[in-house]
Amino acid sequence: MTQRELDPNLLKMYSFLVFSKLEGAVTSGMIHLGDRLGLYQSLSSFAHAVTSDELAASLQLHPRWVQEWIHNQAAARLIEVEIDEQGTERYSMTPEAVVVLSDELHPAFGMGMFHRLPQTMQSLTVLPESFKTGIGLDYDSHGPEGAVGIERSFEPWSRSYLLPVVLPALDGAVHRLEAGAQVADIGCGAGGAAIRMAQAFPKATVTGYDISRYALDRALEKKSIDATRNVHFVDPRVTPLPANESLDLVTAFDCIHDMTHPQDVMEAIRRSLKPDGIWLLVDIKALDTFGENMAKNPMASLMYGISVMSCMSSAMSAVGGAGLGTLGLPESKARSMAAAAGFTRFRKLDIEHSLNAFYEVRP
């Protein structure tokens, strides 16, 4: 079967379709199962449309269960189906479906959120208490699979864009990294970005900071496999950021809005940076008011819901937590908080991304 070229516009539409399915918990659960069982990967590997029995046989799964699952997927318009005159059903995936559902190397791969869907939804059993007490749940409440899900969410994009697009957009950053910069990655998660920078710039020293023990375990495991010597991973509660203006570059990818005390962290970043240092702040695109987000962001309902179950919950997991939440750090707030932390220069980078905004912040 001849595959047509990937259509970027259709890819955006398909990504919206997939993530809108989080509003339907049942189909979202079926997406989780398709990923966990390898059904998408197997279906995308065929050069022709296949029956559900053929798909089941390829993975040694029970055909009746696969048939019911794939009926859900086709009815949800996530998988293509052809029905001939004899009533035989054959299934296939569009190029957009392949990259979103099965190609972990493509930046549009979207299964990270669905990977941790059971853990995210499990939080609903305890969140009623949070509504009463005001205290949320940190990311480790989602267990090890929560850390893996976040890793799978961010790795495809980081692998494709961090080195060739993002770092060169920072004035002078690549030169300093090549010369042996001291780097900190705040909220490093499973360590993908930190390891990537360390490997690309062997003279640099990169330290990843995270408070999730599951994420740090993943990062240390990946470091041992890759044998990268110029990267380290620590818990900032044990080994805090240096406060002696010794760092050349600090990065923070999609984590400030999750923090209980983001202003304190910004101030710690300011103390850690050299007078000519750089802070790369990457966070969720958001507008100043709920009304604007509701009117202009087609995924606003998803983001506010995920915030209750994950982002805002984390940001309120300690007494006095700021509770910014998923859409809680628009550019105006990021600017004002950075200024309050002692930064004097704030520049939005010209990097196009469907979810994130990129800022270069300097003392």
Image: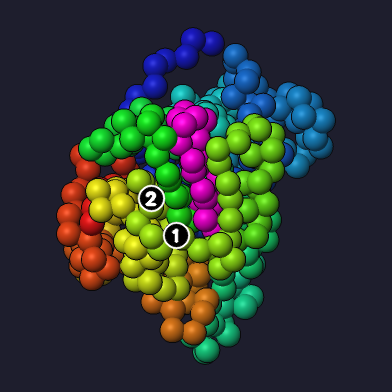
Which sits in the foreground, 8 or 276?
276
Disc 2 marks a residue whose amino acid type is Leu
Quadrant in the rendering for residue 323: bottom left
Q: Position of residue 291 (x, y in %)?
A: 21, 68
Rendered position, 6 above or below 285: above
- Please tell me which residue is depicted at 38% across the width and 29% down the height of the picture: 178
Q: How packed is label 2: few (under 14 Cα within 10 Å), some, or many (20 or more)?
A: many
The answer for how far apart the CA atoms under marks 1 and 2 are is 8 Å
Which sits in the foreground, 64 or 225?
225
- Please tell me which residue is depicted at 57% across the width and 78% down the height of the picture: 127
State the quadrant of the C terminus. bottom left
Q: Position of residue 27 (x, y in %)?
A: 57, 51
In the rendered image, residue 73 lying in the magenta stretch gets the answer no
Q: Are marks 1 and 2 in contact (CB under 8 Å)?
A: yes
Disc 1 marks a residue whose amino acid type is Pro
Identify the residue position indicated by label 1 in the image. Answer: 242
Rendered position, 308 above or below 216: below
Quadrant in the rendering for residue 84: top right
Identify the residue position indicated by label 2 in the image. Answer: 247
SS at mark 1 in the image:
loop
- Please tell me which residue is depicted at 77% across the width and 29% down the height of the picture: 59
- Please tell me which residue is depicted at 19% across the width and 54% down the height of the picture: 346
* Left or right: residue 261 compared with residue 136: left
In the rendered image, residue 189 lying in the magenta stretch gets the answer yes
| Dot placed on the residue nearer the N-terminal end, 1 or 2 | 1
Q: Which residues are magenta?
A: 188-210
Q: Position of residue 212 (x, y in %)?
A: 60, 61
